[in-house]
Image (spheres, grey):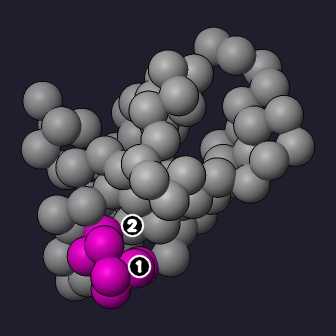
Amino acid sequence: MNQAIQIIDGFEYDLQYEGLKILAINSGALINCYITEVNQDEAEGFYALHQFDAEEHLSSLIEQERFNHNGDIVLSKSELLG
């Protein structure tokens, strides 16, 4: 794993993306990462259960520079759970 990428613990629920908003730092730049398809009522349990897998996937997407047009990383729940 690239040590320049840090995933910040915790999340916020984002209504626009209908999912978790997780912050990452890559070489000093703040990156908004989203996991979509997560209902607000399941968000805490989902995060607790899948935090480490999510961090690995998000780090990989950042390394691959898979940013959307806003400069964000977006990963769906179904992509994460494969």
Residue 48, quarter of picture: bottom left
Q: In the rendered view, would you say 34 is above or below 51?
A: below
Secondary structure at badge 2 equals: strand
81 vs 31, nearest the viewer: 31
Q: In the rendered view, would you say 27 is above or below 20?
A: above
Locate residue 14, reporting x and y percent.
Answer: 40, 79
45 vs 16, nearest the viewer: 16
Residue reaching furthest to the top: 1
Secondary structure at badge 1 equals: strand
Disc 2 marks which residue? 20
Residue 78 disc label: none
Name the N-terminal-most of marks 1 and 2. Answer: 1
Image: magenta residue range = 13-19
Which residue is drawn at the image coordinates 25% and 76% (left, top)? Answer: 18
- Confirm whether residue 42 shows in the render: no
Q: Is residue 60 left or right of residue 8?
A: left
- State the CA–CA distance, disc 1 to disc 2: 5 Å
Quadrant, the N terminus = top right
Locate residue 36, reporting x and y percent.
Answer: 25, 61
Label 1 crowd (10 A; few <14 / some 14-19 / many >=20): many
- Confirm whether residue 61 shows in the render: yes
Locate residue 46, reporting x and y percent.
Answer: 28, 59
Identity, as a three-letter code, of the amino acid under mark 1: Tyr
45 vs 72, nearest the viewer: 72
Identity, as a three-letter code, of the amino acid under mark 2: Leu
Which residue is drawn at the image coordinates 74% and 54% (left, top)? Answer: 30
Disc 1 marks which residue? 13
Q: Look at the image and say whether residue 25 sits in the magenta stretch.
A: no
Q: In the rendered view, would you say 36 is above or below 6?
A: below
Which residue is drawn at the image coordinates 19% and 50% (left, top)? Answer: 77
Label 2 crowd (10 A; few <14 / some 14-19 / many >=20): many
The answer to the question of whether label 1 and label 2 lie on touching residues, with beta carbons closer than 8 A, is yes
